[in-house]
Image (cartoon, helix red, strand yellow):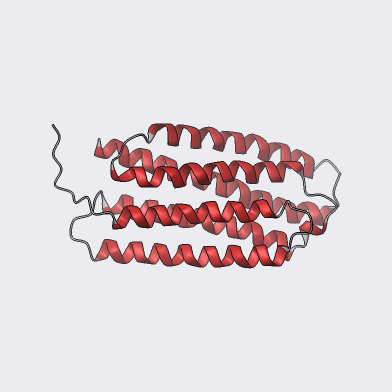
Amino acid sequence: MKFSFRPTEGAFYELFTRAAQNLVRGTTLLNELALPGVDVQSVSERLTEVEHDSDQITHELYKKINSTFITPFDREDIYRLGSLLDDVMDHLEAVGDLLYLYGLTELPALPRELHEMVNVLDQQAKLTAEAMPRLQSMKDLEDYWIECNRLENEGDRINRQLLVRLFSGEYDALTVLKMKEVADELEAACDAFEHVANTVETIAVKES
C-alpha cells in the first residue's frame, strides 16, 4: 500500500474546479454569439466579468500556495496548472472582445467553421470542469486527457478549413485580417486546453 505525507486539503482542488467552471461559462457565452439578434456588447462584457473572476481565482491560488507549508502536489505543478487555466480564459475573452470590437457579428453570417471551433472549445471546457474535482483522488483522469487531446486535433483540422475559407476570396481583405485574428485566438484557446490536459497527465503520473 502506498502512503503519502502530502495533505488532502480540498482548497486547491476547489480553486481549480472554480477556474474550470468559469471556462464553461466562457464557452457558453461564445455560443450565444450564434443566436439571432444577440446583444454582442452584452456577451463581450459578461465574458470580461468572467475573465476578471478567473484572475481573482488565480490570485487566490497563488496566495494559497505561498501560505501553505506542504502542498497536495508539487508547487511548480500547482502554479503551472493555475496559470494555464487562466490562459484559456484570456483567449476565450479575447475572442468575444475581437468579434465585438471588429463588428464581425454584423456580417450576414460568420463562417461555419468558427462556430464549429467554439463547439470544440465548449466540449473541452466541460471535460476540464468534470476532471478538476478528480485531481483530489487522481483517479479516472486518463480518458479526460486523451479526449481533450483528440479534440485539439479536431480543432486543428477545423482551423485549417477556416483558413482555407478566409483566403478563398469570399471575404474582403480587411474582413479576412480581422477574422484571422479571431481564428488565431480560437486556435490558441484550443491549444491551451490541451496544455491543461497535458499538465494534469504529468501530475497524475508523478503522483501515481
> Is residue 50 placed above or below 34 in the rendered structure?
below
Give the x, y percent position of residue 18: 42, 56
Give the x, y percent position of residue 60: 36, 66
Position of 18 with respect to 30 (left or right) is: left
Give the x, y percent position of residue 192: 50, 47
Position of 191 with respect to 14 (left or right) is: right
> Is residue 183 placed above or below 201 in the rendered structure?
below
Q: Residue at x 66, y 51 (%)?
A: 31
Split into 4 quadrants, where in the image is the N terminus?
top left
Number of numbered callouts drawn = 0
Residue 25 falls in which quadrant of the image?
bottom right
Position of 80 with respect to 29 (left or right) is: left
Split into 4 quadrants, where in the image is the C terminus?
top left
Give the x, y percent position of residue 189: 56, 49
> Is residue 55 placed above or below 34 in the rendered structure?
below
Q: Residue at x 65, y 64 (%)?
A: 44
Q: Residue at x 32, y 36 (%)?
A: 139
> Is residue 89 placed above or below 4 in the rendered structure?
below
Residue 206 falls in which quadrant of the image?
top left
Residue 120 falls in which quadrant of the image?
top right
Position of 114 with respect to 122 (left or right) is: right
Q: Residue at x 68, y 41 (%)?
A: 116
